[in-house]
Amino acid sequence: MKKNRQNPLRKRYLRELRGDFGKYLVIFILLVFTIGLISGFLVADGSMIIAYNESFEKYRIEDGNFQTDDEISRANRRKIEKSGVILYDNFYIEKKLKDGNTLRIFKNREEINLLCLMEGRFPEKRGDLVIDRMYADNNGIHVGDELQFGKSIFVVTGLVAFPDYSALFQNNSDAMFDAVKFGIGAVGREDFDSFASDELTWCYSWKYADPPGSKEEEKKVSDRLMEDVADIIYLEDFIPRYMNQAIQFTGEDMGGDRAMMLMLLYIIIVIVAFVFMITVRDTIAREASVIGTLRASGFTKGELVRHYMTLPVLVTLAAAIVGNVLGYTALKEVCAGLYYASYSLPTYVTVWNGEAFVLTTVVPVLIMLAVTFLTLQRRLRLSPLQFLRKELSRRSRDRALFLPSRLPFLLRFRLRIFFQNMGNYAVLLIGILFANLLLLFGLALPAVLDRYQESMKDNMLCDYQYYLKIPAYRMDRDYEFDKILSFSFLRTATMTSNKDAEPFASYTLRIPEGEALRVEDINVYGIKKNSRYIHIPIRRGEIWVSSAYADKCRISEGDTIRLREPYEDRTYEFHVDGIYDYMGGLCMFMRMEDLCERFGLFEDYRSGYFSDSRITDVSRDLIASVIDYDALIKISRQLDVSMGGMMVVVDGFSVVLFMILIYLLSRIVIEKNAHAISMTKILGYTDGEIAGLYIWTTSVVTVLLLLVTIPAVNAIMELIFRNYLAARMTGWITYDIPRSVFYKMFLIGTVTYAAVAAFEIRKIRAIPMTDALKDVM
Amino acid sequence: MEDIKDIRHGTVGSRQLTEKTGESGKTMETTVLLELRDIRKAFGKGENRVEVLRGISLDVKKGEFCVLLGPSGSGKSTLLNIIGGIDSTDSGEILIGGERMSAMGEKELTRYRRRHLGYIFQMYNLIPNLTVRENIEVGAYLGRDPLDVDEILHTLGLYEHRRKLPNQLSGGQQQRTSIGRAIIKNPDILLCDEPTGALDYNTSREILRLIEKISLQYGTTIIMVTHNEAIGAMADTVIRLRDGSIRDRTVNVTRMPADQLEW
């Protein structure tokens, strides 16, 4: 063989591409969007993570912070700093805005947690205010707008990112951050100093003089520090950086998003590989006699494998190039936008991401090549004679299935088409399963969140839960006389005459590491016997857990659970006596007396009130927080805001993917029957009748498959949802999809199919009668 | 063994068939290119088992034009496919140029077809998105010393159609293209499976004329399967098959020109 002679088959490539333009175009688009979107996401994610990681150094993020009830004296400050830390004032004040939102205001930072200016300028004179960029976005605030709290009016001079608030958690114990109703800002020194000192929260940030090398070490060092500080001053809160959700959540979440997107990528790759597989099989079936002739003439299997691989490979490579270009340009901006919608991140610089290239381009291209190659290798294993005789199935020739002649002719005709295409329908089943999975992926989250918000309305413990400013710390019975006095004073001051108010005690415990997918706090409620709000016939010594807790951590009645003190090395074991239907949080219920006894508190210790009406006769200064409906649905509201955009993208994508799959698969059925269709035309069947025969069968099968795949897809999605959310989310949302979502899925599927079917009917019209008369192939 | 009848029709063209040995004393060249020894082949199992070839033995000499004649189901196409290396035997021996075909693996068989064989099918099997010229080039690509494409196009009367796609051609033109594809690589053996089976009388004669021309012009060994008795007259040897056995072997001392064939 003369090697320099070019294979004339190569001239087919361009014609093949033109002839099958629709098919290659949809595959190309699918790959471009997949590769583009995911590489755009990974590039944005990678660049953002780099920006986020660098922000620790660049903006001098604190190693931790604690709160106390008053300004620390110089002497105490020196004592604390002897524990190997440098303290920085990070005081703030919280103001209610006109729209009911809360704005936490700091002094413009100069030494620690430095601000990243994203638009405008820093405060220069009195009345200047910079606010968090994301809060501003979510509330439509722009540079130059005025904000009023109380009598003061401030002008927003700049939008900034607070490096210690990349996720806007108001309290570290919150299940989710809230960038809609909670914002932060900073004013100049003069403005800040003018705030009344009794309104300030005395928050101190620290940096270690000698930073710990590892997370374990950091834990140890911070535990020691907490003990040291607690010996010197009264601690209201103590949050080392590794436990600070406002700082850590973003990093963890970006990692989680990355995992989710990669999962999405590989689902799509499997689908595309699958599409490649069926198109290759289709091509081979169509070209059987050509392949047989070429093989009989002496073409090697290798030559034919290379020949049939060339076009899919070229299309994949072209899509990879275009996809990457789009990924690094337009789509990166879209994805970065999604992050900026969720987090208050500083500005980022696009960083070339080799890993993203490998994951989104090299791996998928290799998978496509492998799938195409293996399919071709397998299919082309048949002998030239089998190709010439079009015996592509390994099975011996099927016997015609008996169909009673009593059945109407058209039905028998349709059934024959069904049996003939069983293989294709099996492929369609897998295709629809994937497409539906992707569709549900996009539809499930918003539906679950809506459902959660709805159910919370009926499922609240009470309309208002008041938490009083009485730290458990003060109640410890080991404490001295002055503490008892102070407790008695507070107890009297927090008495209410509201008839709805029912006191409760509460205590916070934490799930120990390794006990569940996520370390998080469990709120232990001590409730009264025959409580008006918690309807549990709870007896002394009994422990009940909320259904949210039971569902998330898979706890059943009779189980023993282990929990530990958040800031001490002490672990408790509880035997679960019952599960209380409450989805509002991960919590545990016991009798008030039991709680005080178990945790060593005063017998009549109370943390707050359950109430169905507002309590107005307790000073606002003594109320730490009020949990109402708004506060309870914070988690779903924020997920909605931060992930809503992403879900629209996923939804759109899944519909497109679904259309492509249905298009490719129904097209194969039509093409396979082109000869027969042409023949029936010659016999005098109308286009409508032919469509009724060929499209009808596929339509019935598609609709049935759309229906039967829904339960399977739902089960798979629940599994994904549980594993994904249990590890990532503080708190819990049950996977509960309303029926309407499935109706919607079915509707989208059917409408999509109808569009494709209309297109296919046009194709049937276009099949010439000469196809049956001229045996070109 | 099969009966051998000599029917003398005179000399065809300028080529004299010679045989050095044999009782008949004919003057024919005796280089045997293809030897088939006791070829057996059956399809199916148990009750459905059908013996398609029942011990076929024959020699085909270099440059010989051999026609395999027989009704449907006589085993002629199976025999041709076995010679072509695209079907296997249950037993028996095939030697091509002294090489045992049964010893050949998949790759050797492909190489054998590539170097030595040209195939013409009843249904043409042209590549639909390649032009006439390109379809012929597909064959040229496989040959070590292919003939000139333009010359073949002229010889086959396809030059003016060279840019057309198969679906723009008549059946005869399509078959001529498939002949072009088979002979361009200058094969040692040309295997023709009912090449006129799908064509009308005139077009069939036209195709047979071409095959004759190839035989004379290039000295190609030709084995043609047909059920048309009349075509046997244009061959050097006619093998008649029935129920998988050779019923009759005829050597034509002179070949009838394709032009004169009638049926």
Image (spheres, coloured by chain):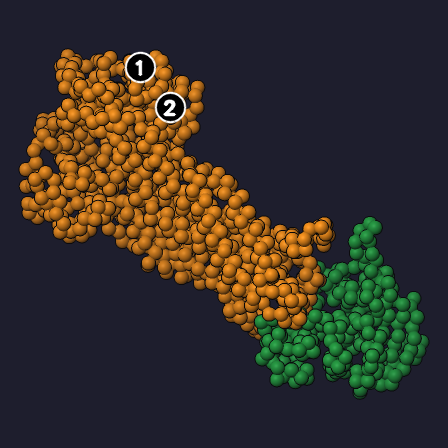
Chain colours: A orange, B green
Residue shown at the point (20%, 41%) measured from the top left: A183
Residue shown at the point (80%, 51%) measured from the top left: B45
Give the residue number, with chain letter if any, for mark 1: A529
Q: Which of marks 2 and 1 precedes in the sequence?
A: 1
Q: Is residue A61 left or right of residue B100?
A: left
| C-alpha distance separating marks 1 and 2 | 15 Å
Q: Are marks 1 and 2 on the same chain?
A: yes
Q: Is residue A234 above or below residue B211?
A: above
Q: Position of residue A563 (x, y in %)?
A: 35, 23
Which label belongs to residue A435? none
Question: Picture quarter containing residue A132?
Answer: top left
Q: Position of residue A702 (x, y in %)?
A: 54, 51
Q: Is residue B217 above or below residue A382?
A: below
Q: Give SS at disc 1.
A: loop
Residue shown at the point (72%, 71%) measured from the top left: B122
Give the residue number, with chain letter if any, for mark 2: A580
In this view, the residue in front, A134 or A295, is A134
In this view, the residue in front, A643 or A14, is A643
In this view, the residue in front, A17 or A210, is A17
Q: Is residue A456 left or right of residue A423?
A: left
User: Dot 2 surroundings within 10 Å: few (below 14), some, or many (20 or more)?
Assistant: some
- Indicate the amino acid at tag 1: Lys
